[in-house]
Image (cartoon, rainbow, N blue to C red):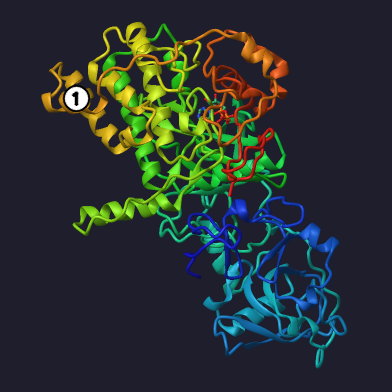
Amino acid sequence: MANFRGSCLHCGEAAVGPIMTAGVTKFHPECFRCCRCQSCIGDDEQYVLVGLSALYCGVCWSKNDTGSQKQHVIKVIKIPALHRDPSQYKLKKNWSDSVVYEVCSLPQSQNGCNGSSCQLNVGDRILEVNGMPVHDYSLLDIERVLNQRTSVVQVTVEQTPSTASRKLEDTKSFGSLSSLELRSYSDMDKPKDKLNRRRDEHRSREPRRSKGCEERAASLSRLSDSSPTPPTYTKAGLARTLSFREQARSQCTFRACDLVKGELLGKGFFGQVYKVTHCETKEVMVLKELYRLDEEAQKNFLKEVAVLRRLEHPNVLRFIGVLYKERKLHLITEYVRGGSLRELIQNIHRPLSWKQRTLFAHDIACGVAYLHSMGVIHRDLSSHNCLVREDFSVVVADFGLARITSEMCQHQLDRSRLAAGSKRGKRIERKKRYTVVGNPFWMAPEMMKGNKYDEKVDIFSFGIILCELIGRVHADPDFLPRSGDFSLNQQTFLEKFCDGCPEPLYRIAFMCCDLNPDKRPSFERLAGWLQSVSSSLTRCLQFPKDLLEEIRRLSGPISCSLSPVSCDENILQATPSLTYSSSSRDITGGGSKSITSASVPVANNPSFTECTLSSACSSLSTFAKIRPLHSICEVDHSNSNSNSINRPALSSPES
Ligand SMILES: Nc1ncnc2c1ncn2[C@@H]1O[C@H](COP(=O)(O)OP(=O)(O)OP(=O)(O)O)[C@@H](O)[C@H]1O
């Protein structure tokens, strides 16, 4: 079995967890897509990898099989079991690469057909037979399987230009071969030789399939993992080689027939979320599928899968696997029964003690501290995207807008170097001019203004969540008092919403909502503070003196609002197409009026669903009210010197 560490050929990121392999090249399942039609290629589907770069699905390839003979190609060929011909495939060992066998002679039936892209040719290098890498087997074993007459044999081959154009010599005919033909195992007779016995052994370890489930086509061994113990679902969804060996935790690929679709749990901007139950284990999970098929939606969804599959933490939504259905990728995650934190906060019939609120905040802080340690900025942290489990622990979810920053990993490294006593280096400049994404209610001021930002934007969002928890108030600026500079209006919040709130808790919230990102505490520190606060609350003790002093010192005096919140509907009406300049000092277009708490019911106005970002930037309130309908707004600030309009940027590309 090959070592499946390495990187994905498509995205270049580490290929861990379930991966698709084409020969020795690896892909994440979500990256294993046809370069022409962009559809995901399932593990039972034909593919052709040309020149170690262009991947085609069987359909697109067969429509346009031109020029293949001049290129390096990895593909799957099926040899049907229809012919009775004594002539045989002959193989030889490829001495330059001891792990593959080369076809040196063909049966007579193929006489004159050499060079065809859909059958074995002289010189083809055989990488896998029936999904098993050939290096585990002797040349005789492989020849025996190829020449058996009882069942379809699926062969993954590598064709080089010389192979494809090589002339057929010295071959005897035994009937035509068809390939690029999909047949399932259930169509085939059970092979008896060693190779097929091995395959059957693997399959016999799988849970019994539900009746009526169509079995998979012969394995291409593209979905692989090296964890020593196959996880629960690995085998349920696959009739291929031992897979999922790379990671200890389970990440699975399901078939549609493995899961029974249940109730619709909700709809986001791009996708919808269903409860599903596994036929065999009865485990309830969540399936997220896209209903929008535009590029933007696809991009965000693939990112969500890509991010989630790398993460494993008790306070981060658990990724279970993926499902290919109708050539589309679906995400399977744990089912979180308690709904969103926002729903819980807003449920006034449900009392929440200060300790419970502190624990919620602690869990989120731990989850996002982990994300940051993994180099992920969430960028859409909100009480919508924090889900509450039955045991009242909270998980952070929804990674469609997340950003992976290698700088952050570097930052972690540097920190550990510093901790290990090496010399203090120059502070790494991590802030970058990324795109503006997320929900404006929770969005950090620096992102709102189109400035450079870093992971501290998540801390601001967390501060808003903490305010929601403290005041059981909507994050909407119509309810949660904000200042003219988009920070929190601490004074008003304190007066209106902090009755009975432990002092450290609201002070922590204020620190998180500081306008200056550098003054916001890290999630690691926040988790520590919140842990101490909750312990004190549990034991009804006074807060430790040093904790209180530290928090007071760092949070400083309670600030008063600089620009009183005003109610100015005219801003909304008068500036329908303001430009959003990345160099402007605020997002109001004019700078004179920054925040309005105008209670214009735009959120419920259907015409705003089509509203563009540029027209939405007239005020925080307008901006904010667009978001619940749009769910995402992206503005590209990559050209920081430009004063030009960044037009409705729902799909602005991100570098
Ligand atoms: N794993 C889960 N378990 C239980 N409920 C979930 C789960 N994931 C999502 N939901 C619920 O399904 C609904 C839709 O979720 P989804 O993540 O698609 O959208 P969203 O976060 O509301 O919006 P957007 O993706 O536009 O930010 C939400 O109300 C959420 O509470």
Decide which of 304, 505 is in the foreground and name it.
Answer: 505
The picture quadrant where one finds residue 507 is top left
Residue 201: where, in percent of width, then height? 53, 63
Whether label 1 lies within 8 Å of ligand 1 gets the answer: no
Question: Height in image: 519 above or below 196?
Answer: above
Q: Which residue is mark 1?
A: 535
Question: Height in image: 608 above or below 550?
Answer: above
Residue 266: where, in percent of width, then height? 59, 24
Question: Height in image: 362 above or below 219?
Answer: above
Question: Height in image: 359 above or below 132?
Answer: above
Element under disc 1: helix
- Residue at 40%, 29% (x, y): give it: 460
- Residue at 38%, 18% (x, y): give it: 467
Residue 618: where, in percent of width, then height? 61, 21
- Whether residue 188 is visible to the viewer of this picture, yes or no, is no
Residue 592: where, in percent of width, then height? 54, 19
Q: For ligand 1, which image quadrant applies? A: top right
The picture quadrant where one finds residue 134 is bottom right
